[in-house]
């Protein structure tokens, strides 16, 4: 089969692949034993769908949240089920798959840039003949950037990286199909599978897989439509018709959500009024996202102070100075993209790539950083796919500058500078990954950066309990209780704090204190099976068998 995007020498492609793999493996060399974290207990380790090797989703129907997650993200959960079937809960297998997906994504970014520089609108660019350079360095900085660590090392966020994988394959296939329509070498190829329709069919198939991996893939058809508008030409009607199958995949996620909500008896109107189950109103969430996007940009430019669980302020008004400054910055960045697009014909067509990268960044974040309130206003893994556009814009801009100033000494000096910066970036990713080596390390780092967050201290206290560091656990959990009592937000995990405190007291031989904490936990959450079991054990330890027997038998058999 002829591949329309292969125009450079095989030696250069081999070098690019080798370098991407070496840099990526070096940045993630210390992640293989990083343990499961936070919600991976519910959604991965104890998930019946994963443990039973996939198949019917009915095994999780009794848990509405888990059922919804499995139905919407079926493809990702199948990969977890395959991991479990092969090696159970040994984390190294999960990390191998996550890192492999990340490396493949970086290689797809490389191919994507090469495809882009073959498009009709860029053929007259000064960079077209040297497109290997921006493709190579965009892929390298993508694979090495420390902001990607959460999407790769946090096992559960395979959801994000796998959805990005399917999305990148889809857009590459679409671009290849568009090139196949125009390049005679492809039209006259001997393989009957080399026609444009097969590239488009592949693009649609992988778009569907992306939609069934994570909901943020909803924006993929919009990215492909932008790609068509920026880099291809032709009759408008034919271009729109060509996009229709891709655009139709946008129905998958809302239809799935609607059917799930109807099945569970949730009314859409009530859900919208309540902010989608999140206590932050949609308008406050939207206003706050103007600040969050600035943080994302800052992390991509200067990746210091990364945090697993940000204690981020929620903003209420567009007139707050920080919000106004953020909106001004976004307006400037988008305006720059428009100016570059309009200047592309006069200066160099490659400016379209910079403009496209800017829009890619904002569009790719539009699902999670708009009017849909999510429980956490900021998460670093959300930058995974959007970062492709940001890095592409920056690297392309750098090489346009090199090209306009001459491809001689300036280029050599620039390549050296980029290589040095790349080494520093990969080293920063390696250091960030070191924080994930165990639960205590991760939550100690997080608590140092979010000291006023009660949930962070709860998780650190739970980590200390698991490590047998009970006095430290009690200190963290007491801090969590104090912070929760001062918080204006409803604390839904308060019973968990008391359950962990009860466990710590029990291990220290303080049964009466443990009983008190387990009783409080059950009062706050009568369905807390763990608290009920441990309360019964404490009663039995003190010879209070009658009180132990009064606990509901179904608790003790779960």
Image: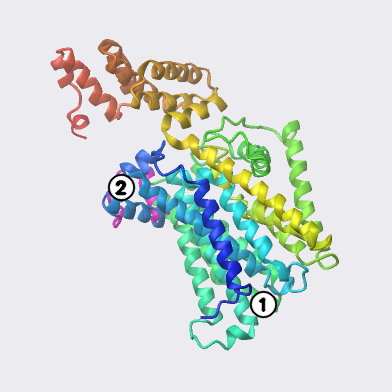
Disc 2 is placed on an element classified as helix
Where residue 428 appears, as percent x and y from the top left, is: 58, 40
Q: Is 309 in the magenta?
A: no
First in residue order: circle 2 vs circle 1: 2
Disc 1 is placed on an element classified as helix
Q: Is 55 in the magenta?
A: yes
Left or right, residue 289 beside residue 93:
right
Are discs 2 and 1 less than 8 Å apart at CB? Answer: no
Q: Is residue 367 above or below residue 375?
A: below
**Residue that appears at 49% across and 61% down:** 166
Mark seen at residue 317: none
Q: Is residue 130 above or below residue 473?
A: below
Where residue 474 appears, as percent x and y from the top left, is: 39, 16
Residue 254, can we see it? no
Residue 475, can we see it? yes
Q: Residues within 10 Å of mark 1 (few under 14, many from 20)?
A: few
**How much space separates mark 2 and mark 1, taking CA atoms?**
46 Å
Left or right, residue 195 beside residue 97:
right
Q: Which residue is mark 1?
A: 237
Which image quarter: residue 472? Answer: top left
Main SS category, magenta section = helix
**Residue that appears at 78% across and 67% down:** 349
Most foreground residue, 38 or 147: 147
Q: Which residue is mark 2?
A: 60
The residue segment tinted magenta is 54-74
Left or right, residue 168 beside residue 235:
left
Where residue 378 appears, as percent x and y from the top left, is: 57, 39
């Amino acid at each position: 089969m002829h591949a329309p995007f292969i125009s450079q020498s095989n030696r250069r492609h081999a070098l690019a692949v080798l370098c991407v793999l070496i840099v990526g493996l070096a940045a993630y060399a210390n992640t293989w034993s990083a343990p499961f974290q936070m919600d991976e207990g519910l959604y991965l380790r104890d998930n019946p769908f994963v443990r039973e090797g996939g198949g019917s989703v009915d095994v999780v129907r009794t848990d509405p949240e888990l059922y919804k997650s499995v139905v919407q993200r079926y493809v990702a959960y199948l990969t977890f089920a395959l991991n479990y079937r092969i090696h159970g809960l040994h984390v190294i297998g999960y990390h191998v798959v996550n890192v492999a997906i990340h490396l493949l994504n970086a290689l797809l970014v490389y191919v994507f840039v090469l495809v882009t520089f073959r498009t009709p609108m860029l053929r007259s660019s000064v960079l077209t003949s040297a497109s290997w350079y921006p493709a190579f360095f965009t892929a390298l900085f993508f694979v090495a950037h420390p902001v990607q660590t959460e999407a790769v090392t946090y096992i559960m966020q395979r959801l994000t990286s796998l959805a990005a994988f399917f999305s990148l394959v889809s857009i590459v296939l679409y671009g290849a199909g568009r090139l196949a329509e125009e390049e005679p070498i492809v039209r006259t190829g001997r393989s009957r599978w080399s026609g444009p329709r097969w590239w488009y069919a592949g693009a649609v198939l992988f778009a569907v897989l992306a939609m069934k991996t994570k909901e943020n893939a909803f924006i993929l058809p919009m990215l492909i439509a932008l790609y068509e508008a920026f880099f291809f030409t032709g009759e408008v009607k034919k271009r729109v018709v060509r996009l229709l199958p891709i655009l139709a995949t946008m129905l998958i996620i809302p239809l799935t959500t609607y059917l799930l909500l109807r099945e569970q008896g949730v009314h859409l109107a009530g859900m919208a009024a309540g902010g989608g189950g999140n206590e932050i109103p949609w308008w406050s969430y939207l206003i706050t996202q103007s600040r969050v996007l600035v943080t994302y940009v800052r992390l991509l430019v200067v990746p210091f102070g990364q945090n697993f669980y940000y204690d981020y302020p929620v903003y209420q008004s567009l007139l707050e100075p920080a919000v106004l400054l953020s909106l001004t910055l976004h307006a400037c960045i988008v305006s720059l993209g428009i100016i570059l697009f309009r200047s592309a014909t006069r200066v160099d067509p490659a400016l379209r790539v910079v403009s496209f990268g800017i829009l890619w960044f904002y569009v790719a974040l539009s699902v999670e950083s708009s009017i849909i309130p999510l429980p956490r206003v900021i998460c670093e893994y959300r930058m995974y796919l959007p970062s492709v556009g940001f890095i592409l814009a920056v690297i392309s801009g750098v090489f346009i500058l090199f090209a306009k100033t001459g491809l001689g000494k300036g280029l050599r000096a620039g390549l050296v500078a980029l290589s040095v910066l790349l080494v520093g970036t990969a080293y920063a990713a390696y250091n960030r990954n070191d924080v994930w080596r165990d639960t205590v390390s991760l939550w100690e780092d997080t608590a140092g950066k979010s000291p006023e967050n009660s949930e962070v201290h709860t998780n650190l206290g739970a980590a200390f309990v698991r490590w047998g560091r009970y006095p430290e656990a009690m200190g963290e959990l007491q801090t969590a209780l104090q912070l929760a009592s001062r918080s204006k937000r409803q604390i839904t995990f308060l019973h968990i704090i008391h359950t962990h405190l009860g466990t710590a007291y029990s291990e220290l031989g303080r049964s009466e204190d443990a009983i008190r904490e387990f009783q409080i936990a059950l009062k706050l959450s009568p369905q807390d099976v763990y608290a009920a079991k441990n309360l019964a054990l404490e009663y039995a330890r003190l010879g209070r068998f009658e009180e132990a027997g009064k606990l509901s038998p179904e608790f003790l058999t779960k």
